[in-house]
Amino acid sequence: MNEGRPTKANRWSRPRPEDAGADTAPPGLTEPDSPHPAVSRNAPSGVGPSAPEERTQATPAVTPAVTRAEAAAPAHGTAPADAVPAQGGAPDDALPLPLVPEPEATGSPNPMSPVPPPPDGPAAVFPAPAGSDGPVESDTPDPWRNYDPWATPGSPRHPGHLARSGPGGPFQQNGVAVPTVAERRRRARKILVLAAVALALASGGVGGFVGAYLERNGGLTDIELPQAAKEAPGRAPDSVAGIAAHALPSVVTLHVHGSEEDGTGTGFVLDGEGHILTNNHVIEPAGGSGTITVTFSGGQTAKARVVGHDSGYDLAVVKVSGVRGLAPMPLGNSDSVQVGDPVVAIGAPFDLANTVTSGIISAKDRPITAGGEKGDGTDVSYVDALQTDAPINPGNSGGPLLDSRARVIGINSAIRSADSGSDLGTGQAGSIGLGFAIPVNQAKRVAEELINTGRATHPVIGVTLDMNYSGDGARVGMKAAGGGAPVTPGGPGAEAGIRAGDVITEVDGTRVHSGEELIVKTRAHRPGDRLRLTVRRGGANRTITLVLGSANGG
């Protein structure tokens, strides 16, 4: 066989189009990385092997080129007839080129069929020259090794892979590209970014699931705060809670609607017949044509009518009908009350029904006057009151003031307001701890008279007082209204020896400082009661005794 023999190391120039013949391939068309020698297509057929040229020691081993004829050699190992050595000849003892099998052997060479790449190896191995001990590995750099004019631009070239060129264009064996360092770094960064995104999504999903679970189930562990055990509902009877529980069923709220104004107040049940005691100034807006609605602590309501009222005592009695299960409020004794005793007030301040407050008795026998809005004195009330610091506000009027046994000892009637200075709590100022209640002993007598007769009687001395006197005590006037006598003839005062101009300074040993206080002390008694008075006349004091008369109130 004549193919595959080594030739001289020749330098080939780039092929030019004008050198190409109609039926020949461009001479010297070689692959820089090809391990096979080039074979000339124009060599005559049948020429025997030629003597090999001598290789000097200085001649480097050059990678032989492979021609199209060699690429098209049949798989059975015989060379085509026109295959001749590329130059002169080759020694007979030279090793032949290895035969490359075709994918499909057809028996005839196919110049367009690419040859499969040889196995990857560390370096190209050439047949050893004659007289050498083994194969020769090429170490000489090839100037065409890094340049292939027939390769597709951008096609990868790998050492050890064979590329072929044909008439239709370059043939190149494509393998798996070895990534560069920059590509490996970019790929690693991309993987890291994707891993970070996946981790963030997974964390968000887990966090959302845990948050939803905690929201629905109140946390991983439910928190239980310490709490006292449930106690029995009952309270000590003398506690505020015990007093309120006993008294509330007997307390009512009154809503009054009149032609000119409306009002709200409090009252309490006196008996099983439906009589309710309250303040006169609570029901006064109703007049003769208004309506009064009573609301019980349980929520049931009923219409009420006025049984009787008295502006001088600031008390009134109304009655409801058709109501069953009424709980009358027990009455105490105001004469037994001591300063400092605990008290409880119940009412509807600012229409807040069933409001309970507590305090103590701050003072007793506190003379107060309330009312006077009419200007003629007919609506002025004179009360020898109980003073308390239990909060009392507008709407508490008419409500009960209770002792420690839930008994009524007073009827809440007035407050001292910081903005107006008035004794009567008709303004909208709040409590400043100065509340006043009508003693129940006085209220009981008036209520009984109002229920029995519809009118209350007032105890009187039978004298006309000078209300403009500024000195200490109550002075009898020099003349009565309309020019009459200041001391009523035949009255209690005349019979006791009182004269015009006398100054009364004490009642039953209690000092009085004004005409209002004398009236208050007098009305704290019943008609027919005996009083001991201290009278100053001409600089000298004397003591007299009289029996109280009576006058109809209104």
Image (spheres, rainbow, N blue to C red):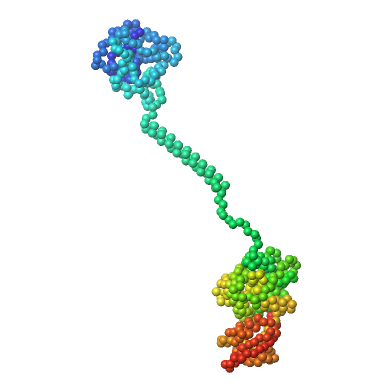
Quarter assignment of residue 414: bottom right
Question: Which residue occupies 61% across, 71% down?
Answer: 342
Image label count:
0
Question: How far across and how far down the image is residue 212, in percent?
Answer: 55, 45
Residue 9, compared with residue 338, is above or below; it is: above
Task: Indicate the position of residue 44 as horizontal and vertical percent values.
Answer: 33, 8
The answer to whether 517 appears left or right of 187 in the picture is right
Residue 169 in sight in this render: no
Q: Is residue 196 left or right of residue 513?
A: left
Locate the C terminus and report the quarter of the image it occupies.
Answer: bottom right
Q: Which residue occupies the foreground of this view, 89 or 216?
A: 216
Q: Nearer the viewer, residue 63 or 224?
A: 224
Q: Residue at x 67, y 88 (%)?
A: 546
* 136 with respect to 320 (left or right): left
Q: Residue at x 30, y 12 (%)?
A: 133
x, y (%) of residue 43?
Answer: 32, 9
Q: Nearer the viewer, residue 79 or 44?
A: 79
Residue most toward the bottom? 538
Quarter holding residue 445: bottom right
Q: Is residue 321 visible?
A: yes
Residue 24 coordinates in the image, percent (x, y): 35, 13
Residue 26 located left or right of residue 306: left
Give the position of the N terminus as an image quadrant: top left
At a point 24% along the width and 14% down the height, the residue shown is 56
Using the rendered view, name the quadrant where residue 501 is placed: bottom right
Q: Is residue 248 above or below residue 179?
A: below
Closer-to-camera residue (103/473)? 473
